[in-house]
Amino acid sequence: MLLSLLYRLLRCLFGLLAVLVRSDLSRDVELLVLRHENQVLRRRFGGRPQWDNAGRLWLTALSRLVNRHRWAETFPVARATILRWHRHLVARKWTYTNRRQSGRPATGASIKTLILRMAQKNPTWGHRRIQGELDRIGYAIAASNGVGDPARCAPIPAAT
C-alpha cells in the first residue's frame, strides 16, 4: 500500500513537471503562431488572409507542439483546416514523382538509323527479323518498337 501511494505521488509529480514544461513550450509556440499570423495579415489583399505553402507548413509544424484541445484558441484557422493542410503536405511528400518514369526508354538515334537502313535494304524483312538481327549484334530492342516499320517512319537519306 505504501509503495502504491509512493508510485501515485511520483506519477503526479512527473505529470506536474510535464505540464510546467509544456506550458512554456506551448506559450512559445503560441507567440510564434501570433507573429506569423501578423506577417500574413500585413501582406493580405482584400478581405481574407492569403496563406501560402510556407505559411501552411509553418502552422502545421507548430500544431504538432500544441495540444489539439487548444488549437481553437491558438491558431487563426479551424482545426479541420490544419488537419487538411497536414494531409495535403503529407500527400505531396509521398508522391514518388522522382522515381516515376513514363514509358519505355527512348531508342537512340544511331539505332534508329540502323533499323531504318536495314528495313530499306531488306524490304522482305519484318520487324521481328530486324529485331533478331539487332539482337545478334548486341542491340536489344523491343519487337514492338515500331521503328523498323518503313510505313510508320520517315525515310532517311541514303548514306554517301
Image: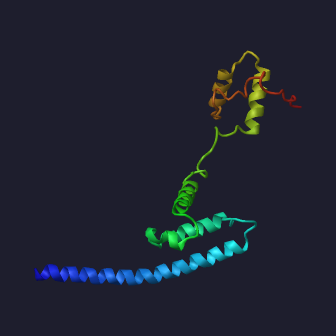
Q: Residue at x 33, y 83 (%)?
A: 16
Q: Is residue 139 above or below residue 40?
A: above
Total tally of numbered discs in the picture: 0
Choose top left, top right, bottom left or bottom right for residue 53.
Answer: bottom right
Given residues 151 and 139, the one toward you in this image is 151
- Left or right: residue 59 compared with residue 7: right
- Residue furthest out toward the top: 124
* Viewport quadrant of the C terminus: top right
Residue 106 is situated, as x and y percent measured from the top left of the image, at: 69, 39
- Left or right: residue 45 compared with residue 142: right
Choose top left, top right, bottom left or bottom right for residue 144.
Answer: top right
Q: Residue at x 22, y 83 (%)?
A: 9
- Residue furthest out toward the front: 47
- Left or right: residue 69 compared with residue 38: left
Residue 3 is situated, as x and y percent measured from the top left of the image, at: 13, 81
Q: Residue at x 84, y 29 (%)?
A: 156
Residue 50 is situated, as x and y percent measured from the top left of the image, at: 69, 65
Q: Is residue 75 above or below residue 100?
A: below
Given residues 96 and 142, the one toward you in this image is 96
* Viewport quadrant of the N terminus: bottom left
